[in-house]
Image: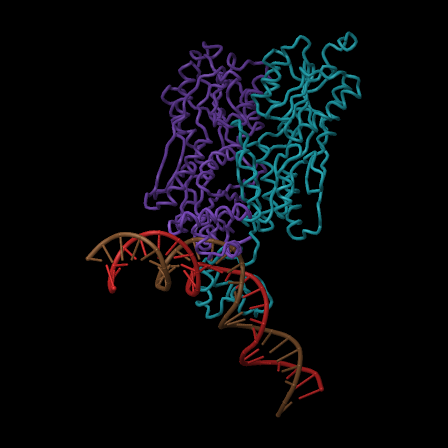
Chain colours: A purple, B cyan, C red, D brown
Amino acid sequence: MNLKQLADLLELSPTTVSRALNGYPEVSEDTRRRVLAAAEAHHYSPNLRARSLATGRAMAIGHVIPVSTSHEIMNPVFADFIAGASEAYGKAGYDLHLTLIPDADQARIYRELGSRRAVDGVIVHSPGRGDARIAMLRASGLPFVVHGRATGEAAPYSWVDVNNRRAFERAAGHLCDLGHRRIALVNGLETLDFARRRREGFAVALAAHDVAPDPALMSSDEMTETNGYRAARAMLDEADPPTAFLVSSIISGTGVRRAVEERGLVTGRDVSIVIHDDDLSYFRNSDPAGEALFTATRSSVRLAGRLAAEMLLQLIARPESGPLTRLLEAELIVGRTTCAPRNPQKIGSR
Amino acid sequence: MNLKQLADLLELSPTTVSRALNGYPEVSEDTRRRVLAAAEAHHYSPNLRARSLATGRAMAIGHVIPVSTSHEIMNPVFADFIAGASEAYGKAGYDLHLTLIPDADQARIYRELGSRRAVDGVIVHSPGRGDARIAMLRASGLPFVVHGRATGEAAPYSWVDVNNRRAFERAAGHLCDLGHRRIALVNGLETLDFARRRREGFAVALAAHDVAPDPALMSSDEMTETNGYRAARAMLDEADPPTAFLVSSIISGTGVRRAVEERGLVTGRDVSIVIHDDDLSYFRNSDPAGEALFTATRSSVRLAGRLAAEMLLQLIARPESGPLTRLLEAELIVGRTTCAPRNPQKIGSR
DNA sequence: ATCTTTGCCCAAAGCGCTTTGGCTTTCCAG
DNA sequence: CTGGAAAGCCAAAGCGCTTTGGGCAAAGAT
């Protein structure tokens, strides 16, 4: 059933039927009701490809997710971000195009995005430092919003980000205040901008508390459970092991906790752990009563997804509303995984 | 830059340019080279909407993911499944449309899918028992593949599934063979078909080993860490607590382990845990050396995604190749979380 | 009574591509 | 030298929708 058939059936022109369905005023209420009823009865719904071609709007947003060369693929953080973005798209009648691409094809894909006209805008995930995609997208003229920021990109662009630097500065500061001097950082991949900012915040806090940074207590890798476990295990094997861990994700944090407890140490008594909590729907950092488990810096990535999507939709509707930015602050939540270090005398002994 | 402009530039007709670009033989090699070079030079890429309209193929696959009424949204299992499917789509030049919809809108969305022509086929996620979506899709004429099966759906349809029943029968049987009699099941939502099959397999194994099922040792909920923790905690509070847990996901399994160890019990010594391992990229069930941690029934959901996608693409290319099915067997992997029960005398005492 | 507005509808053009059905030109067999 | 085949190209139709630019009554203004 297409528009013409429906029009023939109603003995109306396609023009009138189209206007009736799309709420234009040049059609009598009587006719509109008749058209809507017939469309409903015959399960008519417009061919989106034809509509797109005619209107010039695809009514779809592209999410391009880089697939790293390792086989760790789709980050749970993406999943929740996309769930948040979908809330906004659903309301606005937009679809979501998901493309997972190997790093190698990035340039081609981003260059083509604009001309293929399959989407009206793009969300850029996981920017690295001086990410080339931003320049490409700008050149393409396609509206876009970056989830995160790309240090080194001079010209303005729209983004939604968490204040990763401040979050990790506060978290590390909190551990220092508790008396910890051997604080480990189990970070995400530092080729990505957010992880670099987190490390900077971490370093700033240590410096402010006169704690010397120790490269042996800093690791950087994809935020999987296994990587968290592995990093923590190696650090606990050090001659002077950490008394506290600052971990970039609840998932790697779970691995850290496993390494700690495997040693017979008790989290929150012998060793402290602070995580960054993205408030993932399948990995909530709270007990059934709603109390936080891990001490954490919390910022919902799902919310970030929704905000980024809303921002993009606004940029599509009114491109002149110019580059928009939104910096979210993470809240520090004290849970059951932190306390003063077990042997505080160590502080003096160093 | 569109086709006509490119044609004008080359002083050729749009017809010839189109044929040159799409590899048709009615154009001289000389001209083809000239056209390809010009397309490259001017960053021409065809408008996909126009192409779709002309060819009648959308070159896109829809994934519709139900959003439950609770706020647990995007399952990591979906994420890995989609990552697998993307491998197949990428190779074949297909795009992926993702729609997250509340349960309430399901009927409308599925009915419209066919007529809106935005996708050439659909993957159905998380079927429930007698899932209405299957009948709707069949009526729409759109090719589709179900990830999982829907008991109660009489007519044939295409699906890719793991043999959940046998997997859980084997896992529970393994625990029985070790001497366990108090075996808990921490299952996924039993409104979903896979969870029901898992419970059936579990029940069959218990019956075969003359173990009476205890409703107090069976729970069913979304497979989050918190839910696993909560369920295990409640069961450990029982007068006659379980000596082993069979858990539907590595994520809830992590929660179960947390509950166990919080009690001061040692996993793999005092309490056994077997999980079903979907081989999630961000939650691998192996230590750095590649050894399994949890004893598990393993079946890669990413592989399932790839197989389902390939199946769907085949159905689109040759609809007459009829309903296809693929049943994957999970392998039982013995890790470090299982052993004979601590107090085997209990077996006799019951 | 005539002129203008308003309400309601329609024909036709166009979005950018593919594809059908020719139309030339060249080449070679007869 | 001619007829037919083959190679290489093109004009035009069409995919299903939206949108422009009227047209034609009926209603209101003069």
Taking depth in this image into account, of C23 and B169 the one nearest to the observer is C23
Q: Residue B46 in the image: x percent, y percent?
A: 49, 57
How many marks the image carries: the answer is 0
Q: Image point 53% across, 34% down: which residue?
A: B102
Left or right of A151 in this view: B146: right
Across and down, in percent, residue A75 comes to 53, 34
Q: Quadrant of the C terminus of chain A?
A: top left
Q: Is residue B110 above or below residue A115?
A: above
- Residue B290 location (% of width, % of height): 65, 30
In the image, taking residue B53 as reference, residue D29 lies left or right, namely left
- Image coordinates of residue A115 in percent, x first then y, are 45, 54
The image quarter containing residue A88 is top left
User: In this image, A104 relative to B340: left or right?
Assistant: left
Q: Nearer the viewer, residue A15 or B146?
A: A15
Q: Residue A174 appears in which quarter of the rendering?
A: top left
Above/below status of A318 relative to A193 = below
> Is any part of residue A278 visible from this angle?
yes
Relative to C16, say whether A310 is above or below: above
Q: Is residue A116 visible?
A: no
What residue is shown at x 48% (from left), y 10% (from top)? A343
